[in-house]
Image: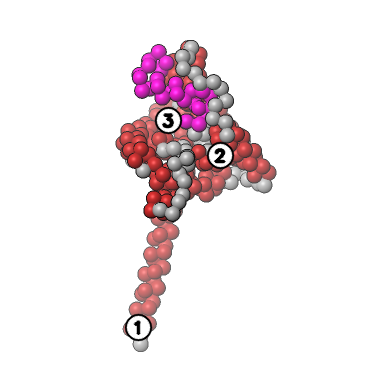
Amino acid sequence: MANFLKGIIVGIGGIAPGLSGSVLLVIFGLYQKTINAIGTIFKDFKKNLMFLIPLFAGFGVGVLLFSKIVDFLLNNFEMQTRFTFLGLIIGTIPLFYKEVKKEGFNKKYYIVIAIAFALGLSIFFFNDNLFPTITEPNLFQSVILGVAVAGSSIIPGVDSAAILSSLGLYELYVSSIANLDFAILIPAAFGLGIGVLVISFIINKLIKHFYTMTFSIIFGLFLSIIPSVLNESCVLAFNAVSVISIVLVFVGFAVSFYLGDIQGNNAKIKGIIKRVKKLSAGKSEIKDTK
């Protein structure tokens, strides 16, 4: 049930602009387990399946329940919604950074993060289309579409819309789903399945043998997609909408930071409550003595 509920939140991250579902898996401490379960699914099929089913079921529920809500909010309250997502993303940074530093981190990895950040900006922010837009794909390009979707979904910090746009595949991706173009979707689904298995296997090996290097690169890429959350509609001014938007940044930050370590934060809150009760009890005893 816990994994199912976390899967719902990951599903919301999957449809929110700039907020990656795989990043939320990292924050929840489920990313390595998920990648390992997919990459080695046939080694212990029953165990891996029992782990993946509730997680992916929750992901599906999250996407279905909140896709229309997010679409409505973006269409009617775009600035406030995007600033909320910005706060949600910023709130994941300390927790993601903590995950990066978990095993043998030293100063040289700051250079790796900076290089990955610069590379990500050059690809996702300053250069929207590295390749020409594909509208009538051949069989190979349709398969590559599925592989690209798999890679952008599995690798944390890589925004699907950004990477698909860079490859000239975003319009094709949206139109093929909207029109249920099975001539494109069937080979894309084949590419998606192959991509998920192969990329999960590779990422799993990299994490096991080069944990800090892999997560440093991923963290840099994650930081590089943050500017893409805000667009030309998000211009601050002296009005109520701007004030609300700024407030929502802090609300989003608090929510994502709290969800990132629910058990730890709950323990801290309980500790504060206990100290307040002890302090109140001490004051009452002093009054009674007097």
Residue 267, percent across and down? 42, 57
Q: How many marks?
A: 3
Residue 33, percent across and down? 47, 36
Front position among marks 3 and 1: 1
Up the image or down, 38 lies above or below 189; here it is below
Residue 280, percent across and down? 37, 74
Residue 285, percent across and down? 36, 80
**Chain-order first, disc 2 or disc 3:** 3
Give the residue displayed 35% in from the left and 85% down from the top: 289
Up the image or down, 83 lies above or below 164; here it is below
Give the residue displayed 35% in from the left and 19% down from the top: 179
Neighbours of disc 2 within 10 Å: few (<14), some (14-19), many (20+): many
SS state under label 2: helix
Q: Does the stretch in magenta take in 171?
A: yes
For the residues labelled 3 and 1, say whether their Cβ atoms are less than 8 Å apart. no
Instruction: Kindly identify which residue carries mark 3.
Output: 48
